[in-house]
Image (spheres, helix red, strand yellow):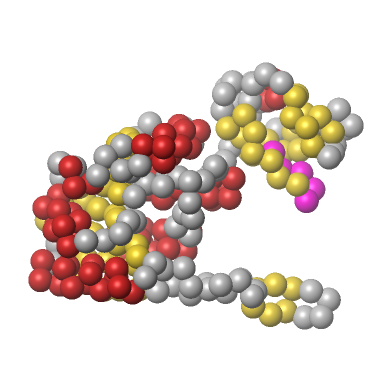
């Protein structure tokens, strides 16, 4: 049952809204929606505007937070997050360290899969925003730490770095990983990727670098062709201890 203060997705014909159940009215071009009426509903129920236009009430998934959550910068794209999850084998038994939290989008994806996630963000204002987004995702297994990951302690099955990589970051990640654990580094530029590869090479037994090119297909009355969106986003280096 939906509770007051819960983040929700309202889906209608050619419209989608990210709202919070609670007091007040939400204004749309299809009419006003009573946010208080959302509390007590169940996902899949229907709410109508004062004009009678229906919207389906849904609990948001990580993909919805990627689209709708407030951002502090450009988050990792789902395709790159997917590579990290797939090539590290991240699962419900894992403790994950995530560094370079940003808006918290990757941490939300990881938190829905791993046993626990500790995410480090050196910029306090970014950490506060990420904590709010993660709280809205109703994830109690994700902890936001406003600090440099070089101060992190403990043992983790996966360490994920989305920041300007230095040898110190890779070396510290190695010290935090359990035997057989994985390091992943997301780097937008080849120069940073080379730092990750060159540092990881002598330490880790299995090092690979991936670039995922994504092309969405678009259809029109003229025909079907790949989207003109930029296909490249960054590089993902995966290394195993």
Q: Percent position (x, y) of residue 152?
A: 19, 42
Q: Please give left or right for residue 13 compared with residue 58 in the image.
A: right
Question: On screen, 205 above or below 5?
Answer: below
- Image quadrant in which the C terminus is located: bottom left
Could you tell me which residue is drawn at 53 percent across and 73 percent down? Answer: 231
Q: Percent position (x, y) of residue 12?
A: 76, 44
Q: Percent position (x, y) of residue 110?
A: 38, 48
| Quarter assignment of residue 189 | bottom left
- Viewer-closest of 166 and 138: 166
Q: Please give left or right for residue 2 compared with residue 86 in the image.
A: right
- Image quadrant in which the N terminus is located: top right
Magenta stretch: give its range: 10-14
Q: Percent position (x, y) of residue 160?
A: 29, 54
Tell me, yes or no, if residue 33 can be seen here.
yes
Q: Residue reaching furthest right?
A: 51
Tell me, yes or no, if residue 89 can be seen here.
no
Asked if the stretch drawn in magenta spans residue 13, the answer is yes
Could you tell me which residue is drawn at 61 percent across and 71 percent down? Answer: 229
- Viewer-closest of 113 and 129: 129
Question: On screen, 133 above or below 223?
Answer: above
Total residue callouts: 0
Could you tell me which residue is drawn at 84 percent across and 33 percent down? Answer: 31
- Viewer-closest of 108 and 185: 185
| Quarter assignment of residue 226 | bottom right
Asked if the stretch drawn in magenta spans residue 88, the answer is no
Question: On screen, 53 above or below 175?
Answer: above
Question: On screen, 94 above or below 230?
Answer: above
| Predominant SS of the magenta segment | strand
């Amino acid at each position: 049952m939906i509770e007051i203060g819960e983040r929700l997705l309202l889906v209608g014909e050619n419209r989608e809204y990210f709202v919070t159940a609670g007091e007040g009215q939400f204004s749309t071009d299809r009419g006003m929606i009573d946010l208080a009426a959302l509390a007590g509903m169940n996902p899949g129920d229907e709410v109508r505007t004062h004009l009678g236009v229906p919207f389906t009430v849904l609990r948001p998934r990580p993909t919805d937070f990627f689209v709708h959550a407030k951002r502090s910068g450009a988050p990792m794209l789902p395709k790159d997050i997917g590579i990290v999850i797939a090539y590290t084998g991240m699962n419900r038994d894992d403790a994950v360290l995530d560094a370079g939290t940003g808006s918290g989008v990757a941490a939300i994806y990881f938190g829905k899969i791993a046993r626990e996630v500790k995410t480090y963000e050196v910029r306090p204002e970014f950490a506060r925003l990420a904590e709010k987004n993660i709280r809205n995702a109703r994830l109690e297994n994700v902890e936001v730490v406003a600090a440099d990951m070089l101060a992190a302690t403990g043992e983790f099955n996966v360490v994920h770095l989305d920041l300007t990589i230095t040898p110190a970051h890779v070396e510290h990640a190695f010290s935090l990983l359990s035997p057989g654990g994985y390091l992943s580094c997301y780097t937008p530029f080849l120069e940073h990727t080379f730092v990750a590869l060159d540092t990881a090479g002598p330490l880790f037994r299995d090092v690979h670098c991936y670039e995922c090119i994504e092309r969405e297909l678009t259809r029109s009355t003229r025909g079907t062709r790949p989207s003109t969106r930029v296909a490249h986003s960054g590089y993902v280096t995966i290394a195993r201890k």
